[in-house]
Image: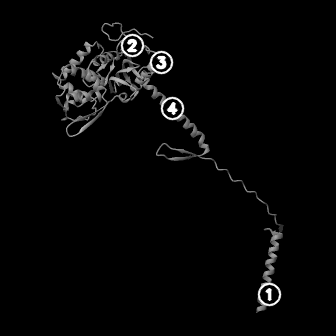
Amino acid sequence: MLLSLMLVFALFVTGAGAALAADRDGSVSASGKTSKAMPHRLIPKKPLAKKRPVALVKSAKRGRVHVVLPAQRNKTVARVKTARHVQATVRRVVADEPMSRAKLATSDDPIALRSGSALVIDAQTNQVLLSKNAMDVRPIASLTKLMTAAVILDAHLPMGQIIEITDADIDTLKWSSSRLRPGMKLSREELLKLALMSSENRAAHALARTYPGGIDAFMLAMNHKAQLLGMTQTRYIDPTGLSPQNESSAHDLALLVKAVYAYPLIREFSTHEKSTVDVGHRQLQYRNTDHLIFNRGWDILLQKTGYINEAGHCLVLNAVVQGRKVIVVLLDAWGKYSHFGDAERIRNWMETSGRTVLTRTDPLPADSSVRLIRTSVNE
């Protein structure tokens, strides 16, 4: 038995060795013929394909990041460049829009003013320093309040008299906001200060409402005073300036600024930086609407700002520049701070140019007998 097992094992080993030898030396084809084994070939490895660069493009929506393949990259870059060019063009158009709306004549405007109308005169000699569309009639917004204050002071009403804000003082034309609520009580002097310093519309309306004869009599007095001052291009419809029908020219407003400089309270209140008003149960903090008041580089003797959509940004000043008192009128500036920027440009030009006269871009009427501003200009 043991012998049989050993014989079988020997035969198995012999057969396996023969099979391995046959495998080394050749192979048997399907037809029964033996063929020589093909030598092993070294197959070169294909080089790994280079990874194509990708570009990460951040989407403008929700900060998403997209993967852009090279095939798409050129188109994407072209689109981005086109979009940037369009955006830059739009920005240039928007930046130039205020200039076109104000109809600026840049070739005749060496200071590049952003205001549609501008006038600068010497307050003492009436010499015209700069004139740009000075006779154009435009809405004047809260510059109206200078005349409102003058008429109130001309009436010699008791400044300590307490006046109550009522529903009649609420603006129903523009629905402008105000912190003066119906029922609050302030003195006439406090209302005058808020109207001039902070351009408080309800304060101005309350002053006119409590004028002897009411609003109608007050408006007659405003327009009558304008005529007395030679402001022939001026009309007043309301005492606040919220109505776009309150119109004047830079020339007429220079007349007004010159006239109201004679009122000490107008000078004081219009240049007051801050004020606290006690309205009974609380105190209200007010600031001047003219940013130049807080600029120590300016010596401002009288000022008033104004703004409604129809009028643009407006500013009048009586200030000392280079040792001389000048009256500055800026109307229809289309930009939140453009009127302040124009005032700075005028002052800097006067300080650095070494000239006492800026330029003249349009003529003024020669009827100087009824005009404050002289027509002669000396370079």
- The residue at the point 53 percent across, 35 percent down is 84
The residue singled out by tag 4 in the image is 88
Tell me the quadrant of the picture where the N terminus can be found.
Answer: bottom right
Label 4 crowding class (10 Å Cα cut-off): few <14, some 14-19, many 20+? few
The residue singled out by tag 3 in the image is 353
The residue singled out by tag 1 in the image is 7
Q: Earlier in the sequence, mark 3 or mark 1?
A: 1
Q: Quadrant of residue 307?
A: top left
63 displayed left or right of 280: right
Q: Secondary structure at mark 3?
A: helix
Name the outermost residue toward the left: 213
Q: Nearer the viewer, mark 2 or mark 1?
A: 2
Residue 105 picture location, percent across and down: 45, 18
Q: Nearer the viewer, mark 4 or mark 2?
A: 2
Label 2 crowding class (10 Å Cα cut-off): few <14, some 14-19, many 20+? many
C-alpha separation, residue under disc 4 versus residue under disc 2 = 39 Å
C-alpha separation, residue under disc 2 versus residue under disc 3 = 17 Å
Residue 128, disc: 2
Q: Earlier in the sequence, mark 4 or mark 3?
A: 4
Q: Nearer the viewer, mark 3 or mark 1?
A: 3
Tell me the quadrant of the picture where the C terminus can be found.
Answer: top left
Label 1 crowding class (10 Å Cα cut-off): few <14, some 14-19, many 20+? few
Q: Quadrant of residue 319?
A: top left
* Amino acid marked by disc 1: Leu
Q: Quadrant of residue 162?
A: top left
Q: Say if residue 224 shows up in the picture.
A: yes
C-alpha separation, residue under disc 2 versus residue under disc 1 = 136 Å
Name the outermost residue toward the front: 323
